[in-house]
C-alpha cells in the first residue's frame, strides 16, 4: 500500500507540512494503562515500521505515554526519520508514580516536556506540539494564555515549528490564535459524542485540522446497535465503519486510531477506506448523543 491509496488522501496543516489523513496514534505502544513498557517491545517496533510501510505519514505521540517509553520505541523503530514522516506530540501533563495524569502546564514544566520529547524522539526540533488542556474527555473553561504563550516563545526560539491544542473549546481556540497560529485541534469526538460539530465546521472553514481522539469511544469499538447493524449489512467491522464515517464527516478530520497489533493496524486502514452508501450515512448521522 502506498500513500495515494490511503483512505482520505492528505491534508496540509501548514506550508511544507502535508500529512495523510489516515494517521496513527502511538498511545497503546506503552504498557497497560499507558504506563511502563509494553509486554512485547519487538511487536511495538514492528507496528511502527508497518505504519511507515503502509504510507502513513502522521504519527501522534507524547512523552508522557509511558512516560518516555512510547517516544523511545518510536526512535528505536524509525530514527533517522524520513522527510515525509511527521511526528505530532503533546505537552501539558505528566505521569506520577501511581500512573496518574497530573497537569504540568507551568512554563518551566512545558519547557522540560519539550526538551524530553526532543531527547527521546531524537530530534532537534518538534514539528507540531499540542497543548493539552481540560480533562480526559472534555474542555475546562478558563484562559490558556500563559501556557500557550510559553509554547509560542519556544516556537520563536526554534524548538517547535507549529502549535496545536488538545481538549479545548472554541473560546480557547480563539484565545490561542490571538497569540500564535494554530494548525490543529485534538478533541474527544466520535459518532455518538458530537459536541464539537460546530467547532469542526469552523475549523474547516479556516483550513485547520481537527483530530478526534478516542474516536471509537475508547480503546474498544464504539458500542451502538445502529453501528453494529450498518457494519453487518456492509460486511465490515463496527470499528471500520466508525473510522470511515469520521473521514466523511469533514475534510479537515485526521484519524489517529491506535493499536499494538500489525493485523489491527491493517484492519483500521482497510476499514477507513469503506465506501458508505447514503442510507448508511443517514443512519449513522442519527446516532449522535
Image (tube, helix red, strand yellow):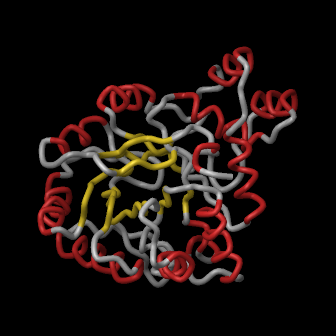
Residue at the (55%, 66%) spot, across then down: 27
What is the x, y in percent for residue 10?
Answer: 49, 42
Q: Name which quarter of the figure residue 158 lies in.
A: bottom left
* Image spot of residue 196 (x, y percent): 43, 33
Q: Position of residue 90 (x, y in %)?
A: 37, 63
Q: Quadrant of residue 45?
A: bottom right
Residue 112, placed above or below residue 134:
below
Left or right side of 125 for 58: right
For the point 74% across and 35% down, which residue is it? 224
Q: Is residue 68 above or below residue 166?
A: below
| Nearest to the observer: residue 162 or residue 3 | 3
Q: Viewed as shown, does residue 14 lie left or right of 29?
A: left
Quarter of the image where the C terminus is located:
top right
Looking at the picture, does residue 46 appear above or below residue 217?
below
Give the residue at x 66% y 62%.
259
How many numbered badges does the structure rendering display? 0
The percent position of residue 19, horizontal first and vertical second, equals 45, 49
Residue 203 falls left or right of residue 251: left
User: Which residue is found at the position 49% from the left and 82% from the top?
Assistant: 72
Amino acid at each position: 500500500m502506498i500513500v495515494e491509496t490511503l483512505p482520505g488522501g492528505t491534508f496540509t496543516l501548514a506550508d511544507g507540512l502535508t500529512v495523510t489523513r489516515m494517521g496513527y496514534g502511538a498511545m497503546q505502544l506503552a504498557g497497560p494503562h499507558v504506563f511502563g513498557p509494553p509486554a512485547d517491545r519487538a511487536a511495538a517496533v514492528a507496528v511502527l515500521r508497518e505504519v511507515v510501510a503502509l504510507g502513513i505519514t502522521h504519527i501522534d505521540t507524547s512523552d508522557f505515554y509511558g512516560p518516555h517509553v512510547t517516544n523511545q520505541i518510536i526512535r528505536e523503530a524509525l530514527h533517522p526519520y524520513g522527510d515525509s514522516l511527521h511526528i505530532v506530540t503533546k505537552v501539558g501533563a505528566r505521569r506520577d508514580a501511581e500512573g496518574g495524569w497530573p497537569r504540568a502546564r507551568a512554563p518551566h514544566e512545558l519547557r522540560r516536556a519539550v526538551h524530553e520529547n526532543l531527547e527521546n524522539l531524537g530530534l532537534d526540533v518538534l514539528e507540531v506540539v499540542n497543548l493539552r488542556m481540560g480533562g480526559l474527555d472534555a474542555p475546562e473553561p478558563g484562559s490558556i494564555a500563559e501556557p500557550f504563550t510559553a509554547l509560542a516563545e519556544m516556537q520563536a526560539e526554534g524548538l517547535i515549528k507549529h502549535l496545536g491544542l488538545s481538549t479545548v473549546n472554541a473560546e480557547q481556540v480563539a484565545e490561542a490564535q490571538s497569540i500564535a497560529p494554530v494548525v490543529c485541534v485534538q478533541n474527544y469526538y466520535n459518532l455518538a459524542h458530537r459536541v464539537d460539530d460546530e467547532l469542526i465546521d469552523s475549523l474547516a472553514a479556516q483550513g485547520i485540522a481537527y483530530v478526534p481522539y478516542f474516536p471509537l469511544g475508547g480503546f474498544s469499538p464504539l458500542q451502538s446497535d445502529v453501528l453494529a447493524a450498518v457494519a453487518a449489512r456492509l460486511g465490515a467491522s463496527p470499528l471500520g465503519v466508525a473510522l470511515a464515517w469520521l473521514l466523511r464527516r469533514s475534510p479537515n478530520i485526521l484519524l489517529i486510531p491506535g493499536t499494538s497489533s500489525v493485523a489491527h493496524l491493517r484492519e483500521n486502514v482497510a476499514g477507513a477506506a469503506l465506501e458508505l452508501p447514503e442510507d448508511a450515512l443517514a443512519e449513522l448521522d442519527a446516532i449522535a448523543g
